[in-house]
């Protein structure tokens, strides 16, 4: 460590052309705080936070532009969006929105990426790298329900190798901490899902699932599953209680090991957990993420389950479930990340009528049914739509994050190094030639970097903590030609 109590803030020199996560290099010695300690200092407030995600599909000829979609979602409580490709228009539209993106490798491209790391790096360099860090890409979903599709040309080994190659490419670029690699599964990967405590993966998939779960455990990526109580109820209305499927407070279904389930989704999640444990990974931390779950508002003739009211009930409760920091009967303290399916009705999707009617919005932006997605602090009052009013929407009121006066210089220096390095902030404005270099003081430079990080990551209160050195401000700290970013 070194004494910076009377020293000016460092002059940073970055290589940002290829690697946004390179650590800051200053003309004076950089703090020797270990990275692990730094991450603990900065990230600890995240432990009690759950987010709400949405699936954004584009198989429709009547959908609004990605720019309008991004503007809409900024005025909602949605803070993560999962897409099914790497559509450049979507990635560009979500830049500087504070919304995290999960992008995807389409099933048809998995085989090519599986051949060698260079192929994965080429995919990464052309489809993702040009958009980060302005667009916050946090995960890559390799394929979708790849192991349970009806396409006999898809090789299970290719999926595992593609995941490994993409991770290796991310490691080489220093992006593996920021961007995780995973793959979404359907519930059909299980031999059976009930009782949850006895669930295992299908016998023919055991070797592949062992490799995948081992990879996820080693890299800290989530296990993604697409879980739909709707289908279980639709196909067995005589034996499945509707309230149980709709996430309601049903009488409860008892597992032989004593777990009591008041809704089917929790039982489905725990069946996946049991299958993971049966592979021998029970003593390892593997987060389970519900990558898709939803309820259609319309189905084929005779489908009495697919109604607007049932869809509204299920998705309202699903969003409440996503916001609550709670787990399942097997793991009550484990948070469950949930992505609602879906944002839009997609009129060009193949399959039966339900496939085209999982959306909460129609293509023209009107609601299919009323679900509250309003954000408590949104500048447009939480109203939703795709008209002109939304185009100026911001994610929250005008707020900024600055460094508290008299903060400890050593902590501020660590915060500055983090934001301008692993945190992904573009700190060129506080370089010697930048508009915010003067005053050349640590407090001023740290304030700029902290605010940029705060705005990038959604303006949540925990993004302005920085070990107690951050302060949310409601007046613009910009001065002269130095402009502090805001959403």
Image: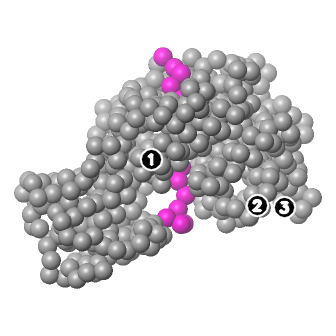
Q: Nearer the viewer, mark 3 or mark 1?
A: 1
Please report whichever mark, 3 or 1, sits nearer to the chain's N-terminal start: 1
Foreground mark, 2 or 1?
A: 1
Quadrant containing the N terminus in the rendered view: bottom left
**Labels 2 and 1: the sequence-earlier one:** 1
Name the spot of residue 133 as percent of width and height, x first. Answer: 35, 46
Q: Residue furthest right?
A: 256
Residue at left offset 54%, top offset 66% = 48
Q: Position of residue 390 (x, y in %)?
A: 34, 37
How many discs mark residues in the rendered view? 3
**Left or right for 43, reference 59:** left
Q: Toward which corner of the image does residue 410 lie, by quadrant?
A: bottom left
Quarter assignment of residue 201:
top right
Point 27% across, 70% down: residue: 30
Marks 2/1: CA–CA distance: 30 Å
Which of the pair 228/297 is nearer the observer?
228
- The residue pinned by badge 3 equals 259
448 part of magenta stretch: no
Mark 3 surroundings: few (<14), some (14-19) or many (≥20) residues within 10 A: some
Q: Is residue 324 visible?
A: yes
* Residue behind mark 2: 282
CA–CA distance in space, label 3 to label 1: 44 Å
Q: Is residue 94 left or right of residue 484?
A: right
Region of the chain picked out in magenta, as a range: 45-61
Residue named by callout 1: 172
Pointer 2 local density, CA inside 10 Å: few below 14, some 14–19, many at least 20: few
Counting residues from the start of the chain, the first of labels 3 and 2 encountered is 3
């Amino acid at each position: 460590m070194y004494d910076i109590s009377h020293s000016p803030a460092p002059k940073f020199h970055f290589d940002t052309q290829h690697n946004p996560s390179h650590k800051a290099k200053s003309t004076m010695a950089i703090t020797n705080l270990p990275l692990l300690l730094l991450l603990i200092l900065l990230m600890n407030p995240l432990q009690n936070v759950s987010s709400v995600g949405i699936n954004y599909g584009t198989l429709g000829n009547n959908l609004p532009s990605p720019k309008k979609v991004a503007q809409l979602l900024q005025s909602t409580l949605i803070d993560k969006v999962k897409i099914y490709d790497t559509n450049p228009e979507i990635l560009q539209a979500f830049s500087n929105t504070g919304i995290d993106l999960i992008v995807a490798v389409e099933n048809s491209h998995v085989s090519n990426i599986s051949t060698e790391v260079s192929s994965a790096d080429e995919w990464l360099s052309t489809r993702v790298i040009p958009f980060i860090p302005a667009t916050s890409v946090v995960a890559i979903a390799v394929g979708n329900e790849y192991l349970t599709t009806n396409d006999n040309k898809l090789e299970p080994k290719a999926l595992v190798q593609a995941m490994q190659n993409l991770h290796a490419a991310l490691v080489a670029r220093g992006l593996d901490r920021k961007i995780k690699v995973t793959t979404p599964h359907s519930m059909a990967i299980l031999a059976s899902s009930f009782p949850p405590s006895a669930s295992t993966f299908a016998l023919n998939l055991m070797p592949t699932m062992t490799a995948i779960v081992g990879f996820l455990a080693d890299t800290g990526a989530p296990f993604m599953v697409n879980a739909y109580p709707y289908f279980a109820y639709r196909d067995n209305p005589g034996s499945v209680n509707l309230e149980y499927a709709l996430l309601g407070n049903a009488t409860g279904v008892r597992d032989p090991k004593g777990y009591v389930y008041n809704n089917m989704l929790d039982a489905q999640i725990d069946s996946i957990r049991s299958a993971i444990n049966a592979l021998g990974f029970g003593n390892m931390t593997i987060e389970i993420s519900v990558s898709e779950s939803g309820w259609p508002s319309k189905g084929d003739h005779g489908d009495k389950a697919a109604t607007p009211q049932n869809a509204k009930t299920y998705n309202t409760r699903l969003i409440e479930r996503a916001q609550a920091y709670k787990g399942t009967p097997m793991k009550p303290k484990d948070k469950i990340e949930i992505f609602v399916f879906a944002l839009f009705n997609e009129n060009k999707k193949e399959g039966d009528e339900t496939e085209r009617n999982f959306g909460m919005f129609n293509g023209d932006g009107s609601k299919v049914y009323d679900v509250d997605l309003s954000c408590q602090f949104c500048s447009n009052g939480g109203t939703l739509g795709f008209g002109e009013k939304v185009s100026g929407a911001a994610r929250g009121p005008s707020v900024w994050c600055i460094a508290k006066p008299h903060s400890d210089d050593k902590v501020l220096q660590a915060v500055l190094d983090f934001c301008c390095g692993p945190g992904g902030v573009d700190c060129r404005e506080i370089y010697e030639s930048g508009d915010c270099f003067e005053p050349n003081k640590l407090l001023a430079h740290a304030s700029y970097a902290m605010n940029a990080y705060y705005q990038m990551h959604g303006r949540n209160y925990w993004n302005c903590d920085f070990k107690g050195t951050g302060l949310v401000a409601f007046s613009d700290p910009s001065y002269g030609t130095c402009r502090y970013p805001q959403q």
